[in-house]
Image: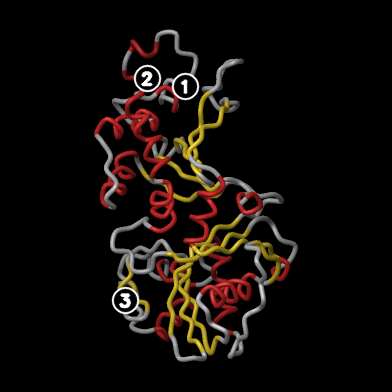
């Protein structure tokens, strides 16, 4: 049986026993360890107007959240890594954080701040990290055409069956591929496993382009916050390690409230398409053949194409968006 934290202290004990078991959680683990071992009270640093900072990520995150929530002095803070907790016993049972049951959570970190004025605030943080010398795309959401349409519909954004089928063509779902019909293969120079954006059903494509144009903020919010049904700790902040750092205390991070990131993304650009050609793999494009890549704001949309999940729909944050917005 998985351990169920019955309170904050018990959750921290479980976390302490599991931190470090998964390399992918090392960034969050270091942050939680540092926040939980700080000497309090903590006076937040003055971060200025920029969202990109260099320094100790734990202290920068705590300062940014305190600033965003109007907390001048943090009397105490407790950080929990949902990844560390979920892997305590293979993540098969429910966890409890501050008395709230958690099965799956979009937030990678859950921070509880006790303000000097008596307020107690619990916020979720979604973390992204790049360990390359320069920023790369960061995966935001991984789903299927049907599930993505279902997510929109569950949040009162209407999507027609025609549009869903068009998105299945884009993803290359079985029955919606060029290879499923001899007629669509005749004279085809591009990948026979899927249709590209410019090739999908025109009516369905226009509906998606209208949705991404008119509902950009709503869809961006869903991608940033809503991965799971009944998620008790949707992220209200995003912490993004921008690139490889020489030392922990000289790490560059971008920190945004979700609302601020949505606003900046919309101001950056609306729905657009960008021309590209497939240069690698077994289905490289011939010279002169190009396709259209859909994107809106800082979000790029593509067919997953991975060996395990080739027809998944993948949403990424544009490489280096934090320098552009």
Q: Residue at x 29, y 40 (%)?
A: 146
Q: Which mark is residue 324?
A: none
Q: Position of residue 123 (x, y in %)?
A: 44, 73
In 3D space, how far apart are the residues under numbered discs 1 and 3 (Cα atoms)?
Answer: 47 Å
Please say if 311 is above or below 68. Answer: above
In front here: 193 or 215?
Answer: 215
**Tag 2 or tag 3, which sits nearer the N-term?**
3
**Tag 2 or tag 1, which sits nearer the N-term?**
2
In 3D space, how far apart are the residues under numbered discs 1 and 2 (Cα atoms)?
Answer: 8 Å
In 3D space, how far apart are the residues under numbered discs 3 and 2 (Cα atoms)?
Answer: 47 Å
Q: Residue at x 67, y 55 (%)?
A: 243
* Residue, disc 2: 178
Please say if 171 is above or below 85. Answer: above
Q: Which mark is residue 100?
A: 3
Mark 3 neighbour density, 10 Å: few (under 14) some (14–19) many (20 or more): some
**Tag 3 or tag 1, which sits nearer the N-term?**
3
Q: Residue at x 45, y 82 (%)?
A: 13
* Residue, disc 1: 191
């Amino acid at each position: 049986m998985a351990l169920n934290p019955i309170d904050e202290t018990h959750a921290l004990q479980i976390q302490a026993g599991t931190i470090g078991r998964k390399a992918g959680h090392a960034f969050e683990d270091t942050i939680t360890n540092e926040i939980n071992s700080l000497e309090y009270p903590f006076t937040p640093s003055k971060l200025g107007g920029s969202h990109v900072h260099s320094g100790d990520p734990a202290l920068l995150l705590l300062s940014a959240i305190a600033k965003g929530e109007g907390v001048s002095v943090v009397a105490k803070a407790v950080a929990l890594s949902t990844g560390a907790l979920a892997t305590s016993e293979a993540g098969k049972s429910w966890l409890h954080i501050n008395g709230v049951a958690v099965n799956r959570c979009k937030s990678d970190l859950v921070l509880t701040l006790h303000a000097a004025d008596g307020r107690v605030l619990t916020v979720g943080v979604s973390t992204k990290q790049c360990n390359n010398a320069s920023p790369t795309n960061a995966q935001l959401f991984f789903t299927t055409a049907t599930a993505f349409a279902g997510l929109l519909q569950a949040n009162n954004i209407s999507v027609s069956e025609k549009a869903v089928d068009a998105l299945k063509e884009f993803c290359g779902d079985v029955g919606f591929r060029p290879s499923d019909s001899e007629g669509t293969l005749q004279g085809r120079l591009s990948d026979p496993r899927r249709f590209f954006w410019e090739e999908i059903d025109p009516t369905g494509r226009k509906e998606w382009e209208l949705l991404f144009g008119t509902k950009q903020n709503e869809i961006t919010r869903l991608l940033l916050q809503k991965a799971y049904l009944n998620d008790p700790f949707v992220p209200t902040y995003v912490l993004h390690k921008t690139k490889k750092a020489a030392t922990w205390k000289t790490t560059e991070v971008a920190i945004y409230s979700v609302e601020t990131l949505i606003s900046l993304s919309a101001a950056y650009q609306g729905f657009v398409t960008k021309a590209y050609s497939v240069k690698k793999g077994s289905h490289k494009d011939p010279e002169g053949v190009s396709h259209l890549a859909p994107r809106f704001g800082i979000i790029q949309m593509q067919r997953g194409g991975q060996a395990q999940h080739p027809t998944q729909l993948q949403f990424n944050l544009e490489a280096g968006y934090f320098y552009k917005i």
